[in-house]
Image (cartoon, rainbow, N blue to C red):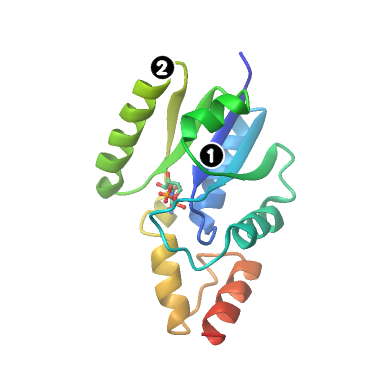
């Protein structure tokens, strides 16, 4: 079995909650492909290239991590990368239903691919990219929730608007 896994997500932008999941996955698996999903139903504030760049800058020192992006079905992408599983993070109860639906659908689409959930570190249980964007918009401090480069990128985005 190949211990290569894919951690897909919007990462708009990457937060310390995502990075916690990425580090922990990197401690378990040989290779973690963190991949920005270009979701046509969402209207991100960072472009695909910007999200990839921020992930590269913030995961650079983790040897097991590679950063990529994709469109289309996650299961097709995972297969094309010869990966064995999808990693997702689970926060409060509210994540459960959506994640359960998605994992079940993905299992239907490709029974060989497992979805593995890592429980959030309680420090980040209420942290999401959306909350970070709201705080950034009103100039609040983001020290505990995003890395410095992400904070800078957010402030630049909102100052230019
Ligand atoms: P998506 O649009 O795919 O849900 P996100 O970037 O919001 O993309 O999240 C990607 C994954 O990371 C999801 O599995 C989500 O539950 C998980 N995640 C997001 N924030 C946190 C956090 N603070 N702690 C743990 N997991 C998280």
Mark with earlier residue (2, 1) = 1
Query: How many badges with numbers are in the image?
Result: 2
Give the x, y percent position of residue 2. Answer: 63, 18
Give the x, y percent position of residue 21. Answer: 52, 44
Query: Which residue occupies the extreme top position in the image?
Result: 1
Nearer the observer, 61 or 137: 137
Q: Is residue 47 above or below residue 39?
A: below
Nearer the observer, 144 or 127: 127
Check mark 1 vs ligand 1: CB closer than 8 Å? yes or no.
yes
Q: Mark 1 Cα within 10 Å, few/some/many (few <14, many 20+)? A: many
> Which image quarter: residue 123?
bottom left
Taking the spot 47% from the left edge, 63% from the top edge, the residue there is: 44
Left or right: 80 with respect to 139?
right
Q: Secondary structure at mark 2?
A: loop
Spatial separation of the CA atoms under disc 2 and disc 1:
18 Å
Check mark 2 vs ligand 1: CB closer than 8 Å? yes or no.
no
Q: Is residue 3 above or below residue 118?
A: above
Q: Secondary structure at mark 1?
A: strand
Which residue has dot 2 on it? 111
Which disc is residue 7 wearing? 1
Mark 2–mark 1 CB contact (< 8 Å) = no
Taking the spot 63% from the left edge, 62% from the top edge, the residue there is: 50
Left or right: 69 with respect to 98?
right
Give the x, y percent position of residue 42. Answer: 40, 58
Q: Mark 2 Cα within 10 Å, few/some/many (few <14, many 20+)? A: few
> Which image quarter: residue 49?
bottom right
Give the x, y percent position of residue 95. Answer: 30, 46
Q: Specify the quadrant that holds the N terminus.
A: top right
Q: Is residue 133 above or below residue 66?
A: below
Q: Nearer the viewer, mark 2 or mark 1?
A: 2
Taking the spot 44% from the left edge, 29% from the top edge, the residue there is: 116
Which disc is residue 16 wearing? none
């Amino acid at each position: 079995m190949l211990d290569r896994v894919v951690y897909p997500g919007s990462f708009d932008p990457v937060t310390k909650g995502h990075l916690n999941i990425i580090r922990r996955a990197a401690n378990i698996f040989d290779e973690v492909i963190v991949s920005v999903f270009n979701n046509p139903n969402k209207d991100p504030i960072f472009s695909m290239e910007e999200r990839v760049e921020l992930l590269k800058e913030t995961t650079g020192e983790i040897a097991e991590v590679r950063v990529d992006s994709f469109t289309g079905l996650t299961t097709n992408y995972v297969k094309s990368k010869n990966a064995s599983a999808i990693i997702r993070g689970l926060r409060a109860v509210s994540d459960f239903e959506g994640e359960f639906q998605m994992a079940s659908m993905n299992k239907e689409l490709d029974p060989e691919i497992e979805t593995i959930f890592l429980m959030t570190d309680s420090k980040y249980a209420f942290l999401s990219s959306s909350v970070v964007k709201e705080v950034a918009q009103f100039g609040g401090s983001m020290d505990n929730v995003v890395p410095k480069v992400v904070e800078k990128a957010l402030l630049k985005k909102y100052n230019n608007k």
